[in-house]
Amino acid sequence: MHIERLIKMANDVSNFFAADPDKQLAVEGITNHLARSWEPRMRHSIVAYAKADGAGLSELAKAAIDKL
């Protein structure tokens, strides 16, 4: 899967959880979603991208990916 698609998907998930007033809970929700719903190759790709550059990822998405 192309990294652009993974970035969009991660940001979409983070947008859903962004409504939570407790940002720590939002980050945990995103992390749990990515851990449960994304296949290992997808997680590996987005983690590697976040470590190398991370451009285009929302703040919440970056925080959640850092916890994977």
Image: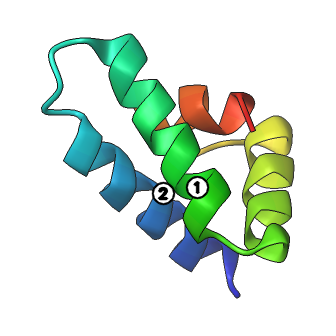
Residue 4 as seen in the image, left or right of residue 18 = right
Going 59% across and 45% down the picture, which residue do you hit?
55
In the image, residue 7 above or below residue 41: above
Residue 15 is situated, as x and y percent measured from the top left of the image, at 25, 47
| Image quarter in which the N terminus is found | bottom right
Label 2 and label 1: CA atoms lie apart by: 8 Å
Quick check: marks 2 and 1 in contact, CB under 8 Å? Answer: yes
Quadrant of the image occupied by residue 18 = top left
Residue 18 as seen in the image, left or right of residue 23 = left
Going 71% across and 28% down the picture, which residue do you hit?
67
Comparing 62 with 43, the one in front is 43
Tell me which amino acid carries mark 2. Ala
Going 36% across and 55% down the picture, which residue do you hit?
13
Secondary structure, mark 2, is helix
What residue did someone put label 2 on? 10
Quadrant of the image occupied by residue 40 = bottom right
Sequence-wise first label, 2 or 1: 2
Regarding residue 54, the answer to whether it shows in the image is yes
Comparing 2 with 34, the one in front is 34
For mark 2, does the 10 Å Cα neighbourhood hold few (<14), some (14 to 19), or many (20 or more) residues?
Answer: many
In the image, residue 17 above or below residue 12: above
In the image, residue 58 above or below residue 4: above
Regarding residue 57, the answer to whether it shows in the image is no
Secondary structure, mark 1, is helix
Comparing 30 with 60, the one in front is 30
What residue did someone put label 1 on? 34
The numbered mark at residue 17 is: none
